[in-house]
Amino acid sequence: MNSEIASMRQTPERRQRWMATLARTPLQDLHALLDRYAPLPAYQLPRPPETGLCMVRGRMGGNGRPFNLGEMTVTRCVVQLEDATAGIAYVTGRDRRQAELAALADALLLNGHLPLSALEPLRESQAKHREQRRKAVASTKVDFFTLVRGED
């Protein structure tokens, strides 16, 4: 794929969206995605999967002052295809294979081996899961209020 076509495919916002989708995709779904586009090109791991911690920050009410919420486990990986295309992935947890396959999918999206449309079923599945969680959380919501007493 020539660099002009590759640069059209890879706007920063588009890549951020597909990397977020890949990072949230379970291992079995990544296997299924890549199996549909086999045979895959050979690749190497210039930075094999490694697990570490990152600080998670939060804000009170979503717009207050930021604070350190705590640390979470993250696994990262870099994959390089035969054509020198490099893919990267950061996934939550310790699943090294998930990080490797997500990085491989990133590289395959960059070089055009995987079409962007291949991610649509993954996005739909993730949206459905988010909606189910939202409904489950909403059903447990409690509204607190204060009554004003009429006493003098």
Image: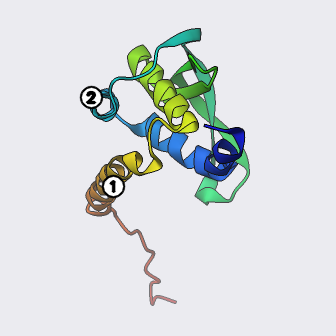
- Name the foreground residue: 21 vs 68: 21
Disc 2 element? helix
Above-or-below relation of 97 to 132 = above
Query: What residue sits 30% from the left and 50% below the top?
Result: 125
In the rendered image, which quarter contains the N terminus? top right
For the residue carrying disc 2, how many other residues have a C-alpha within 10 Å: few (<14), some (14-19), or many (20+)?
Answer: few
Horizontal side of residue 131 vs 41, given as left or right: left
Query: What residue sits 38% from the left and 69% below the top?
Result: 143
Mark 2 = which residue? 28
Q: Earlier in the sequence, mark 1 or mark 2?
A: 2
Total numbered labels: 2
Amino acid identity at mark 1: Glu
| Residue 44 place in picture, x, y as percent | 53, 10
Horizontal side of residue 56 vs 141, given as left or right: right
Above-or-below relation of 145 to 38 = below
State the separation of the CA atoms marked 1 and 2: 16 Å
Mark 1 = which residue? 124
| Residue 92 place in picture, x, y as percent | 47, 28
- Name the foreground residue: 146 vs 85: 85
| Residue 76 place in picture, x, y as percent | 55, 20
Amino acid identity at mark 2: Gln
For the residue carrying disc 1, how many other residues have a C-alpha within 10 Å: few (<14), some (14-19), or many (20+)?
Answer: few
Query: What residue sits 39% from the left and 16% below the top?
Result: 97
| Residue 114 place in picture, x, y as percent | 44, 38
Disc 1 element? helix
